[in-house]
Amino acid sequence: MSANPVLWNLDERGVATVTLNRPEVNNAYDGALIQGVLAAMDDLGTKPLRVVVLKGNGKHFQAGADLKWINSVRPQSPAVNEAASRATFEVVQRLNTLPVPTVALVQGGCFGGGTGVISACDIVIAADNALFSITEVRWGLTAAIIIPQLCDSIGVRQVRRYALTGERFGAEDARRIGLVHEVVKLAELESAGDKVVEQLLANGPEALAETKKLALESSFGGMAVDDAAFERLIRLHSAKRQTAEAAEGLASFAEKRAGRWSVQK
């Protein structure tokens, strides 16, 4: 297992690279990775920061939640489950409201919470091998805490398809619906990111911060959703994890079988 689940560095231009570093599980997030991202942002908040580039180490960008970790949290108290959902939400929301531009470089799988993470980034470039899915319903869970960001990036109409089907779709479809801005060959992903960073660095940092803030204030999600609304989403997200349906969904994942769903009357 990786010693440090999140790596970061800052160059002399003020460009930070934050790398998800659990390649052995396709960068699936658990409590340690969540805290690692938050710690990285705390550290970077004290630096002369201009741009943040978000990457995933290995073949895949981010495979959503580590379902083994979810299964370990699920039987614990409602307070523990709510704390886990709140920390996950905080990662997405802090990326969303960071006062500098954020650029996500996506290769391979980007599933579940990973789609929320890139929706919270300002610019998303995907390799042509990227594959996406809003997977939560497949496991009897909900994507509650990332729905506002997804609605911002791809619109309610597309959320009503992809968050309900849980289907996988490729990079060109992701570009078509607005989840990513650009698709490049895998070998060109880094250079495409470098080009966008150079374009961002050519602009006034205060103007960038104000423009981003105004855009968020005008959006469906992001800063337009107040704290009370987000608290409700956090409660829904954590409570669903503790239902019988979620237990069956997670069991189906562990046992590599289809879920055996029942309808409550």
Image (cartoon, rainbow, N blue to C red):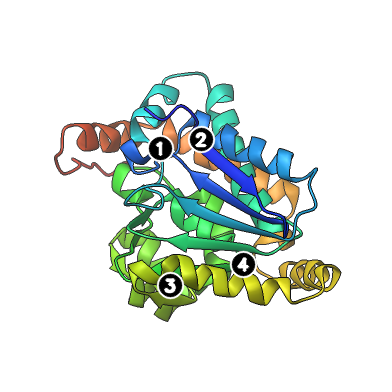
In this image, 217 relative to 141: left or right?
right
* Residue in the picture at 33% in, 64% down: 130
Q: Note whether 104 is above or below 233 in the view shown.
A: below
Q: Calculate the distance from the C-alpha at mark 2 to the C-alpha at mark 3.
A: 29 Å
In this image, 112 relative to 51: left or right?
left
The answer to which of 211 and 200 lies nearer the viewer is 200
In this image, 65 relative to 232: left or right?
left
Q: Which is nearer the N-term, disc 1 or disc 2? A: 1
* Residue in the picture at 68% in, 64% down: 101
Mark 4: amino acid: Asp
Q: Note whether 50 is above or below 238 in the view shown.
A: below
- Which label sits on residue 158? 3
4 or 3: mark nearer the eye: 4
Viewer can see residue 265 = no
Q: Note whether 182 is above or below 152 in the view shown.
A: below
Q: Which residue is mark 2?
A: 33
Q: Which residue is mark 1?
A: 22
Q: Calculate the distance from the C-alpha at mark 2 to the C-alpha at mark 4.
A: 21 Å
Q: SS class of the residue under badge 2?
A: helix
Q: SS class of the residue under badge 1?
A: loop
**Can you give x and y, in whole percent of width and height, for residue 22 in the image?**
40, 37
Q: Which residue is mark 4?
A: 122
In this image, 115 relative to 249: left or right?
right
Furthest toward the bottom, the residue is 176
The answer to which of 149 and 45 lies nearer the viewer is 45
